[in-house]
Amino acid sequence: HATEAHQTDLMTITRFVLNEQTKRPESRGDFTILLNHIVLGCKFVCSAVNKAGLAKLIGLAGETNVQGEEQKKLDVLSNEVFIKALVSSGRTCILVSEEDEEATFVEPSLRGKYSVVFDPLDGSSNIDCGVSIGTIFGIYMLKDSHEPTIEDVLQPGKNMVAAGYCMYGSSCTLVLSTGTGVNGFTLDPSLGEFILTHPNIKIPKKGKIYSVNEGNAKNWDGPTAKYVEKCKFPKDGSPAKSLRYIGSMVADVHRTLLYGGTFLYPADKKSPNGKLRVLYEVFPMSFLMEQAGGQAFTGKLRALDLVPEKIHERSPIFLGSYDDIEEIKALYAAEEKAA
Ligand code: P6P
């Protein structure tokens, strides 16, 4: 009967979130409406990315497609779709996108109580070789109704009410947390619905994989170098870890969430704040990691405690299995003490 139930009792992402939200007395359905518009954006991007292989159809900026239309790069196109979907939801007030230098302040007639920070197509440089890429998003709720200012999105990640990513790979998987655990949904193209496929995701306490761009090794600081050395040449006789690095954050983080281990984008001499952006890469992934029982650390503090000063600022990030990140924190603490 279980399979029958599955076939007829479809747990779509909308139904799942509605169930969660109705448990909150103050909920008026706004979040569910907002999420539905984010899901619409993800469905569009999934379809466009899958077609991207037919380059002539999608083309790249500056090229024209078979209809002779000027084609936009996929990340520009995706950004426009998300901005329009979020504004038209009538539930947002400030939008921060990796693609836009300035934040978007929604006009008063369409203004709602949520701010959304997002990277519409992270890792888009990997499209041409078919590597999985993704949309990453985080959601803040405005405390009370006041004229929104940029300060309303320069909040620590721990104030986010929800975060998630959608990975465009062999299948289209949306992983979401609204603060009560992490759940994964897979797009069923025949229904056009995201169906619950990964309920209550928990990251293994320890992992056998580390994920970092070893090409930056010459620029790493002491603790990072020591941690990677320990992964490759363990002193306690345990087996060496495997290195898995895809170079697309959503894909590397999704594997880490499901299989365990660590994902690092450390600071280095060339980039003292690392490469990944605080608001729409570090915070959402750190939120998910903590909700799944893992940790996220910047080398100095808990990632979600960071208070951003600029909407595109960067931070080093070490995230993954709880015990593995404890090891990294101990190495940084030891360096702190020795200093
Ligand atoms: P590197 C992709 O360009 C990205 O922003 C993330 O998705 C990814 O984790 C990182 O950069 C890869 O950076 O320097 O290792 O190529």
Image (tube, rainbow, N blue to C red):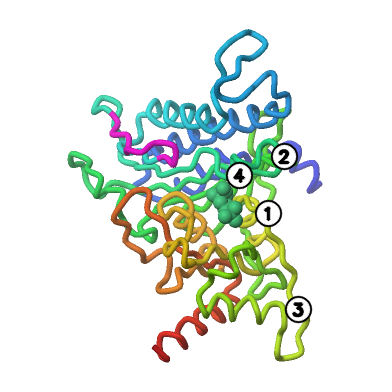
Given residues 42 and 224, the one toward you in this image is: 224
The percent position of residue 293, horizontal first and vertical second, equals 56, 68
* Observer-nearest of 76 and 218: 218
Of the residues under marks 1 and 4, which one precedes in the sequence?
A: 4
Task: Tell me the residue at 66%/75% (across/down).
Answer: 206
Q: Specify the quadrant of the image occupied by residue 263.
A: bottom right
Residue, x 30% and y 40% (percent of image)? 113
Circle 4 is placed at which residue position? 174
Report helix, strand or loop for mark 4.
Answer: strand
Q: Secondary structure at mark 2?
A: helix
Q: Circles 3 and 1: CB distance less than 8 Å?
A: no
Asked if residue 68 is positioned above or below residue 311 in the image, the reply reads: above
Q: Is residue 274 above or below residue 137?
A: below
**Range of residues picked out in magenta:** 97-106
Q: Position of residue 212 (x, y in %)?
A: 62, 64
Sequence-first disc among 2 and 4: 2
Q: How many numbered marks are there? A: 4
- Amino acid at circle 3: Ala
Few, some or many residues within 10 Å of mark 4 (<14, 14–19, 20+): many
How packed is label 1: few (under 14 Cα within 10 Å), some, or many (20 or more)? some
- What is the residue that sits farthest to the top in this orientation? 67
| Residue drawn 53% across the image and 68% down it | 318
Examine the image and state in which quarter residue 33 appears.
Answer: top left
Q: Which mark is residue 246?
A: 1
Q: Circle 3 is placed at which residue position?
A: 240
Distance between the alpha carbons at the discs numbered 1 and 4: 19 Å
Q: Work out how far the residue at label 3 is from the one at label 1, CA to CA, in angstroms.
A: 19 Å
The residue indicated by pointer 2 is: 129
Three-letter residue code for mark 1: Ile
Viewer-side label of 2, 4: 2
